């Protein structure tokens, strides 16, 4: 009999007490049915009892960190080290540094070395988390460049999604990451959603649920590479028009709709043994009439997630620094309210020490019970035990390259990116690209390398094609000149890069590029619009003669777009979302590859 995931987690809790798991192995369903008893045992464990109340509270804090190795006199580094060495926080998240609007990726060996350094400084082993929604490449250089989850939805391959989960777990453990904040369980059914978009598997709740389940299965398939996985953002951030980084979002739908749509993927996550659920800084009037953010709503976290969905794992808040919560309360008050509501872990507070002090005072004044703190701290210690951190907390630096298996995972990433390419419209038969008279215009992002792979791959495959690269920083006079030059082409292929990370709060084309695109589309030359990122752009340019989407800005998706444009690969993807009035879920034209297209490219 296979030991169930809940039973395995229970064994970790029991291990804290020095007890055996034979009963759980013999009867996993019985073990899974008594989570409250396991938490109670964890709360009485010798390890937990050895911690002061301050340190038990500190275990509930996961602070912001980075994957680089700063100098010892760096003020940010000294503050971070104090949180670990003196305040004894429970862990840190490897966040991405932002430079010129772009996330700077960490280097694998530098990041692993830094994690080892922090683990040596910690009294209790640290949980190290990361937003590996598309594998380690979301934060780490020199790793397989997996496309966004919506590309997996367009490829309609659950086995590939399962392989993504397994690859993510292996990459994470090779680097020293034990907690993955993935998969995204949001149903992106609002085309104006400025923060989820291609991070979601799609618009159909059941398809998203299947993708979530497959990812979790894959991530949990190898006990040697155990990681905690997290469904987010509860109770569902896909039907909002606000970016909770900037303001509190709102899911203004009736309870019946939320139960049928938004909660479906989370039910799947719970059924597949997800370790954690991340909250959303989002009001849900159907479940909390006070319009309280879900992160601090006991109706949402305890009533809905714990009692109705039966989730007994770790509830982690979304980043406490986000304005959807931080604009409403001080860090200390927000921390207390989140714990009161049912959260176990406070993610990325700007002032961890203030949070610890506030929770200590709340316990001293009987606002929060010590038993409530013990229950959450017991879960965190049990999770660390399950991840093997009390046996081995350090990364084997000599084994990093083997663990990343870059070529194997890169092949998977490229395969999915190619099968995700979807052709929604082609009124002028622009795909595949004719050999003569074509122009390709790449609308990139300022200070970004996006578009370089696409241009290089096009030039290699179709050297006769004239290519232009533009971005929003260019003067209108330059854009006008390029539009005039392009008017002499027989057909124009305009590739756009729009992501939620680059355009915080918006998924529209930047600045003057929107006007530039309108000039092209209405200029008398057939224009094929190619979206690398936001798939809803066709709404802004419905007169485009053709529309192709990759649902991802990863370089593997850029290469896939070039191959599809030149006929090297067949176009087979199907829409995982609808574009109101223009495309339905499941739409997608099948275009066969050109014979010998691959052999004709320039090497």
Image (cartoon, rainbow, N blue to C red):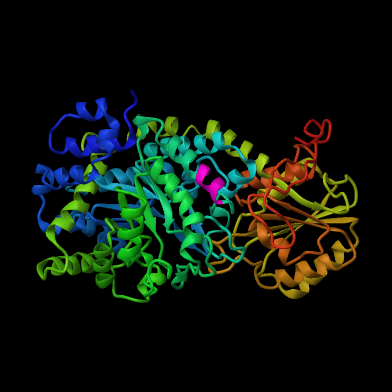
**Residue at the image point whose x is 21% and y is 59% from the top:** 82
Q: Is residue 292 left or right of residue 19?
A: right
Residue 498, located in which quarter of the rendered image? bottom right
- In the picture as drawn, the residue positioned furthest to the top comes out as 1
Residue 366, located in which quarter of the rendered image? bottom left
Q: Which residues are magenta?
A: 205-211
Residue 231 appearing in the image: yes
Residue 409: percent from left, percent from top: 53, 34
Residue 158: percent from left, percent from top: 56, 37
Q: Is residue 593 left or right of residue 216?
A: right
Looking at the picture, does residue 85 appear above or below residue 137?
below
Residue 76: percent from left, percent from top: 31, 63
Q: Would you say residue 566 sits in the magenta stretch?
A: no
Residue 369, located in which quarter of the rendered image? bottom left
How many badges with numbers are in the image?
0
Q: Main secondary structure of the magenta part?
A: helix
Looking at the picture, does residue 214 appear above or below residue 190?
above
Quarter occupied by the C terminus: top right
């Amino acid at each position: 009999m296979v030991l169930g995931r809940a039973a395995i987690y229970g064994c970790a809790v029991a291990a804290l007490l020095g007890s055996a798991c034979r009963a759980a192995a013999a009867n996993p369903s019985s073990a899974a049915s008594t989570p409250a008893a396991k938490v109670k045992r964890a709360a009485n464990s010798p390890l937990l009892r050895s911690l002061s109340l301050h340190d038990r509270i500190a275990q509930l804090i996961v602070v912001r960190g980075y994957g680089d190795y700063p100098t010892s006199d760096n003020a940010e580094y000294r503050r971070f080290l104090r949180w670990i060495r003196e305040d004894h926080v429970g862990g840190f998240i490897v966040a991405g540094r932002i430079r010129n609007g772009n996330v700077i990726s960490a280097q694998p060996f530098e990041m692993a070395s830094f994690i080892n350094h922090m683990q040596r400084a910690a009294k209790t082993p640290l949980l190290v988390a990361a937003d590996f929604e598309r594998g380690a490449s979301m934060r780490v250089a020199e790793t397989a460049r997996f496309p966004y989850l919506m590309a997996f939805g367009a490829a309609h391959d659950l086995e590939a999604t399962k392989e993504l989960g397994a690859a993510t777990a292996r990459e994470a453990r090779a680097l020293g990451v034990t907690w993955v904040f993935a998969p995204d369980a949001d149903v992106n059914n609002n085309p104006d959603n400025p923060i989820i978009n291609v991070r979601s598997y799609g618009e159909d709740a059941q398809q998203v649920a299947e993708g979530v389940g497959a990812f979790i299965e894959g991530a949990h398939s190898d006990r040697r590479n155990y990681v905690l996985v997290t469904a987010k953002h509860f109770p569902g951030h896909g039907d909002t028009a606000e970016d909770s980084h900037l303001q509190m979002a709102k899911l203004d739908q009736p309870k019946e709709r939320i139960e049928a749509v938004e909660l479906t993927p989370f039910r799947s996550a719970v059924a597949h043994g997800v370790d954690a659920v991340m909250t959303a800084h989002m009001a849900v009037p159907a479940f909390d009439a006070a319009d309280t953010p879900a992160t601090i709503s006991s109706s949402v976290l305890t009533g809905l997630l714990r009692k109705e969905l039966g989730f007994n794992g770790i509830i982690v808040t979304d980043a406490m620094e986000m304005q959807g919560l931080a604009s409403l309360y001080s860090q200390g008050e927000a921390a207390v309210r989140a714990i009161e509501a049912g959260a176990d872990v406070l993610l990325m507070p700007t002032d961890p020490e203030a949070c610890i002090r506030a929770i200590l005072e709340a316990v001293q004044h009987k606002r929060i019970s010590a038993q409530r703190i013990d229950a959450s701290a017991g879960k965190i210690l049990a999770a660390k035990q399950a991840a093997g951190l009390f046996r081995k907390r350090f990364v084997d630096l000599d084994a990093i390259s083997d663990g990343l298996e870059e070529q194997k995972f890169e092949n998977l990433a490229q395969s999915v990116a190619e099968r995700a390419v979807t052709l929604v419209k082609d009124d002028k038969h622009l795909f595949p690209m004719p050999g003569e008279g074509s122009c390709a215009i790449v609308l990139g992002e300022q200070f970004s390398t996006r578009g370089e792979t696409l241009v290089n791959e096009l030039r290699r495959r179709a050297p006769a094609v004239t290519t232009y690269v533009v971005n929003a920083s260019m003067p209108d006079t330059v854009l006008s000149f390029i539009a005039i030059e392009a008017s002499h082409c027989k057909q124009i292929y305009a590739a756009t890069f729009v992501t939620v990370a680059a355009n915080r709060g918006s998924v529209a084309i930047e600045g003057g590029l929107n006007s530039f695109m309108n000039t092209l589309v209405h200029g008398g030359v057939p224009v094929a619009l190619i979206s690398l990122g936001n798939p809803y752009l066709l709404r802004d340019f419905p007169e485009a003669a053709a529309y192709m989407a990759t649902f991802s800005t990863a370089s593997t998706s850029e290469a896939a777009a070039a191959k599809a444009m030149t006929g090297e690969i067949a176009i087979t993807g199907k829409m995982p979302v609808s574009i109101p009035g223009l495309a339905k879920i499941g739409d997608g034209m099948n275009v066969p590859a050109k014979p010998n297209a691959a052999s004709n490219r320039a090497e």
